[in-house]
Image (cartoon, helix red, strand yellow):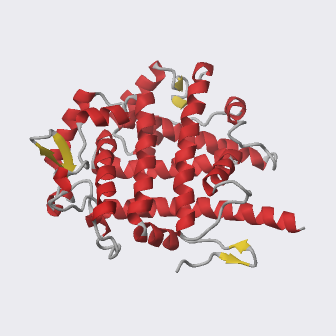
Amino acid sequence: MKKKYKYNNILLEVNKSQIANSLITNFTELMAGFYEMQSTFLSNLYGRYESIETANIVLCFAKNTHLEIIRQREKHLNHDISFNNFWNNFNTIKKPAHKIVDIVNMTGLPKETARRKIKLLISKNYIMHDKKIKEYCWNLLEKDKKNYFLIVEQEIKMLSKFISSNANSINIDLNNEHGKSCCCSVQKEIKSQFSFYWFHFLSCQLKWLHMWQNKIKDMDLILIALQAVLRALSFAEKNENLKDIGLENLYLLIGKTNSEYRKSDAGISASSISQVTGIPRPTCIRKLNILVEFGTLVRDEKSKQYFLNQLTENRTRNILTKDNVHNTVKIFSEYLTVVLNAMIQNQNNDSKKNIA
């Protein structure tokens, strides 16, 4: 029976252990939604910047830009930080500037790699450079405005779905509007306080990407591996007994398979990955082969498809390690705790106003 998080019609705050336990208990449902969200987010980044490493640098500037927008409330308590007002905020605030060493610290990229990527971003007008003080800041051009809003709108929908699924899993009702779904209410809340929620979302993503940068170095591999994980989780949810999941064996579940696995539609191909992620097919083939060398994937010679390795000791030695899976749960549990409690507080404030 789910625990009720309500007292006298007021929602109670949650803590990260409750979120983490829910992610574990409802792993295939919630984490499949997580991997789907990450696949969309990273694919959008790849489409704009042609590499996750390059995009990671832009995320640093974007995160701190949203923080500067939030800080406008120190001057004006009711300052509008909504999605609709973002473009105005972006063009009126003083843009946060960073040196290369700041980018290195935030991303984990080698200094020379960061320098090379920043030069590329400057050439494409994504970053501006103050040559006098050797600092850089984020740049969004008017011609990119429509595309930026379309992409972020899609990401907000995916994020809202993930947040509402996690809220529902612990019986928290974030639907404060009659006739609308919880996901729609969450989406409306994110848009109304956009810079607050996006600052925390980007902070979480940077932590997660920093983890992978330290461990794998090539973050495009993570986007490709996600596609295999999504297929395997879909297969596992339909075919495996998932009742006895705990923190100690959680990492073993990803890709847990049986003899019917290779005959199923759980495989991926270079063409399908290229279509989903935007990564060129030749690059997909090269990186899929790296994942085979890592032991994460195996290639079926007959179908030419790739599957998560059925040999656990091989599959879990690089990407799908116990630490990596546990750290992912930890990072996103902390994020969800902040976000859900902010939404709970806002909903409780609205309820008190209605009572008054």
Residue 313 is situated, as x and y percent measured from the top left of the image, at: 15, 63
* Quarter occupied by residue 116: top left
Q: Residue at x 75, y 74 (%)?
A: 9
Mark yes or no: residue 287 visible: yes
Q: Residue at x 29, y 56 (%)?
A: 235
Assign the C terminus to one quadrant of the image. bottom right
Residue toward you, 302 or 139: 302
Total numbered badges shown on the rendered structure: 0
Residue 132 is situated, as x and y percent measured from the top left of the image, at: 55, 24
Residue toward you, 205 or 344: 344
Q: Residue at x 66, y 45 (%)?
A: 194
With 71 as the anchor, is 47 left or right in this view? left
* Quarter occupied by residue 325: bottom left
Residue 307 is situated, as x and y percent measured from the top left of the image, at: 20, 49
Residue toward you, 196 or 110: 196
Mark yes or no: residue 105 visible: no
With 235 as the anchor, is 107 left or right in this view? right
Residue 29 is situated, as x and y percent measured from the top left of the image, at: 42, 61
With 352 as the anchor, is 204 left or right in this view? left
* Quarter occupied by residue 240: bottom left
Q: Residue at x 57, y 64 (%)?
A: 167
Q: Is residue 304 above or below residue 26?
A: above
Residue toward you, 347 or 217: 347
Outermost residue on the right side: it is 356
Q: Is residue 155 above or below residue 262?
A: above
Outermost residue on the left side: it is 301
